[in-house]
Image (cartoon, rainbow, N blue to C red):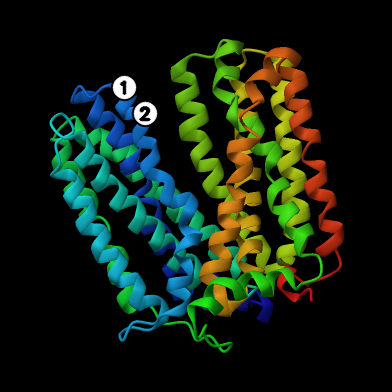
Amino acid sequence: MLSESRKKILYEIFSGRMLVALLMGFACGLPLLLTITVLQAWMKEAGVDLTVIGMMALVGLPYTLKFLWAPVLDRFTLPFLGRRRGWLIVVQVVLIFSISGLGFTDPAKNPWMVAFAAFLVTFFSASQDIIVDAYRREDLSDQELGLGSSLYVNGYRVGMLLASGGGLIMADHMPFSMVYQVMAACLLPGVATTLVAREPRVASGTPQSMREAVFDPLKEYFSREGALWILAFILFYKIGDSMASAMTTPFYLDLGFSKTQIGAVVKLFGFWATVIGSLIGGVAMLRLEINRSLWIFGFLQAISTAGFAVLARIGDNITALSAVIGFENFSSGMGTAAFVAFMASITNKKFTATQYALLSSLMGVPRVMASAPTGYLAKHFGWESFFVACTLIAAPGMLLLIKFAPWHSKKTGSDIT
């Protein structure tokens, strides 16, 4: 017979709340690449100038700046479905129409109308991200956040895969305009999920004014002891992993791997290794708690980066490539699940949307800033030394855990006052 603790874990794994986290993740991941990969292919096929195609990256700014309007979603509650689900259903319906409308534009004749329609897609997609992140934090207990976050991340990845891989495959058999109609329809399960999901109950209340919604989240966060240390941790925890990932494709090509080998091993095999890693990480967090998971998964994440240095010494060996990619993506999936769960756990439920939007925007800074000099470093130090440096640069993020997430403590950043 199963013990009570195992029964509890199985109940949490197969609960409806976890299915909601997975489906909402899928709904958030699907729109992202419709304004990047798929749209670039459509514009290229339509003969749009490469300069214009490159400028289209600017339509993605809402994903970076979503903290600017997150306070509105914390402050106001619509008169139906509740504080989170009310906003979510409105945003999802408008997002579906925006994706459909993007499909009716003409990149060859009016690329700026395409840009406007794509901007609407990214704005409402980023808004959906804000609300879903807040919903997940408020709907799940701290113990459930690890698994719920891993399922959300995996749903997000499946949505991205369907939009990019599926979208491009469909574009070989139907017009791009029809592809966007199909993708818009693929968001209907997200709408159904919103309608049947429960509205989370928040005991701490809601902001009573826009001033309170804008300034109190910052005031509340920085009133905590160790608040700056936690921000530093968010910047540094995955910096080594981000720097290494920025230069992996040139690295594989330099070693002599073919593009087919890179596609099969790195993209396909690596995708499933990441999915399995985040799932196992999420289940493990039910027992380990978030703090210990950050230690264990962070250590594995750093060691996996060192695997690229080993591969640099071995050279063109498909078995070694598979082993390194499998371990790196597996441990990265675990680390991401713990990291996302940690960021959710340190938000105050009164200001969930605003605080999480700010933290997730901050999380993206290292991916851009720290990745910029990686080409210079790899060129001047060589691949092996470069990846060793990426491994060592993970140390500050790990050491910061001593300050606010010691091994034997179950406290998270939201408990530190």
Q: Quadrant of residue 131?
A: bottom left
Q: Position of residue 61 (x, y in %)?
A: 43, 46
Q: Which residue, given by chain and number where applicable, does mark 2 sit on?
A: 54
In the rendered view, tell whether residue 91 sits above or below residue 246.
below
Frontmost residue, 324 versus 213:
213
The amino acid on which the numbered mark 2 sits, given as a three-letter code, is: Gly
Q: Label for residue 380?
A: none
Residue nearest the observer in this picture, 201 or 206: 206
Note whether residue 313 is visible.
yes
Q: Quadrant of residue 26?
A: bottom left
Query: In x, y percent, where is residue 28?
Result: 39, 57
The N terminus lies in quadrant:
bottom right
Q: Position of residue 238 (x, y in %)?
A: 68, 44
Q: Are marks 2 and 1 in contact (CB under 8 Å)?
A: yes
Q: Total of numbered circles in the picture?
A: 2
Residue nearest the observer in this picture, 363 or 165: 363
Q: Residue at x 53, y 61 (%)?
A: 357
Residue 162, given in percent of the width and then of the height, sits at 33, 45
Gap in angstroms between the C-alphas marked 2 and 1: 6 Å
**From the viewer's perspective, is residue 2 above or below residue 64?**
below
Nearest the camera: 257 or 133?
133
Would you call the spot at circle 2 few (<14 residues within 10 Å), some (14-19), or many (20 or more)?
Answer: few
Check disc 1 and give the amino acid type. Answer: Leu
Q: Which residue is mark 1?
A: 50
Residue lying at 38% horizontally and 84% vertically, measured from the top left? 82
**240 above or below 280?**
above
Q: Quadrant of residue 295?
A: bottom right
User: Is residue 11 visible in this depiction of the protein?
Assistant: no
- Residue at disc 2, secondary structure: helix
